Amino acid sequence: MECGNYRGISLVAHAGKVLPKVVATRLSHYCEREGILPEEQSGFRPHRSTLDMLFAIQRLHELARNKSTAEWFDVGQGLRQGCNLTPLLFNLFFAAMLMVAVAEFDKDPNVTADMVKIGTQVEYTGKKGRSAGKKTTVVTDAEALWAMLYADDAAIVSRSPESLEKMMSVIVRVAGLFGLMVSEPKTEIMCMLPKGIEERPFTVSAAGQTYKQTDRFVYLGRTISADGKADREITSRSCRAWKCYRRNSASIYDRRRANRQLKIRLLQAEVVETLLYGCASWSLTAEHYMKLNGTHRQFLTRCIGWSKRKRSDRPPVLYPGPHPGRLR
């Protein structure tokens, strides 16, 4: 375990959580109504999830390609865990930092010009004249997408390495003013290019930090590939689902005397959810569907105790003689 990833947990009495819950609810409604929190932030907010950021990543692809313990140590920074106000206060704190960063971006026209513009496609069916019955795709006004945030997990987007380097320099500098630090080992660069264009390696340096280029990285639990395909993600999801299955295989799934309905319900709630996490943002092919169905079928066959033995070794499906319970 890395000590840098550790955060202490502060236990709060149940009675002490009532007042923070009331304040958090009212403050959350006020922030959502007044638009204080930026659109790029999806963490700790109602009606938002990791799927929003994963879908934004997928949209970028489509646009680009048409048991021992360590010694004790003191924790001087970090959020207070266990308090209802903590997530909302973090969003407000992070929003203040982003306001300063965006103000710095606006000073450089090249940075704002290289921000990715994403619009919404709407199908319109004509009702009058020559366009009657014809379907037309209309793209609404595009908005600049420069960041995708879920709590402190951030993805910064730009059309050019030069603008990305300027943006990262501003973010590192502004984060330092607010007492935050960008983790250099956890920060990587990935390039999304149209088909037929050869990728050239490059690095980005910002405020003394250097970020290396990679062809894949894990963001919000999903494996993002530079080619925009879901092959690596499906392989990773299958491995994690099997790991989740084996964790309870000896006690539940592989026990023949265990209730079958209980096994299926647990399989659906735990293993299948792990297998299909973020699937709404995938771009799948027929081969991907076959692979997912095959993995799901393997889980089901193991739950019911079916194995690929020779036909001669299998018990007979039909009783060869009269049914002992009905015919005598």
Image (tube, helix red, strand yellow):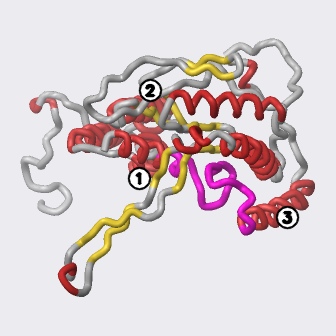
Are there few (<14), some (14-19), or many (20+) residues within 10 Å of tag 2? some
* Mark 3 element type: helix
Look at 62% across and 19% down and name the residue there. Answer: 205
Look at 71% across and 63% down and name the residue there. Answer: 35
Say which mark, if any, is on residue 165.
Answer: none
Say which mark, if any, is on residue 22.
Answer: 3
The amino acid sitting under disc 2 is Arg
Say which mark, if any, is on residue 216.
Answer: 2
Look at 13% across and 41% down and name the residue there. Answer: 316
* Mark 2 element type: strand
Q: Position of residue 3 (x, y in %)?
A: 75, 19
The amino acid sitting under disc 1 is Gln
Residue of label 1: 261
Q: Nearer the viewer, mark 3 or mark 2?
A: 2
Q: Earlier in the sequence, mark 1 or mark 3?
A: 3
- The span picked out in magenta is 33-54
Are there few (<14), some (14-19), or many (20+) residues within 10 Å of tag 3? few
* Mark 1 element type: helix
Q: Position of residue 135 (x, y in %)?
A: 24, 72
Q: Nearer the viewer, mark 2 or mark 1?
A: 2
Residue 321 placement, left or right of 242: left
Residue 270 among those drawn in magenta: no
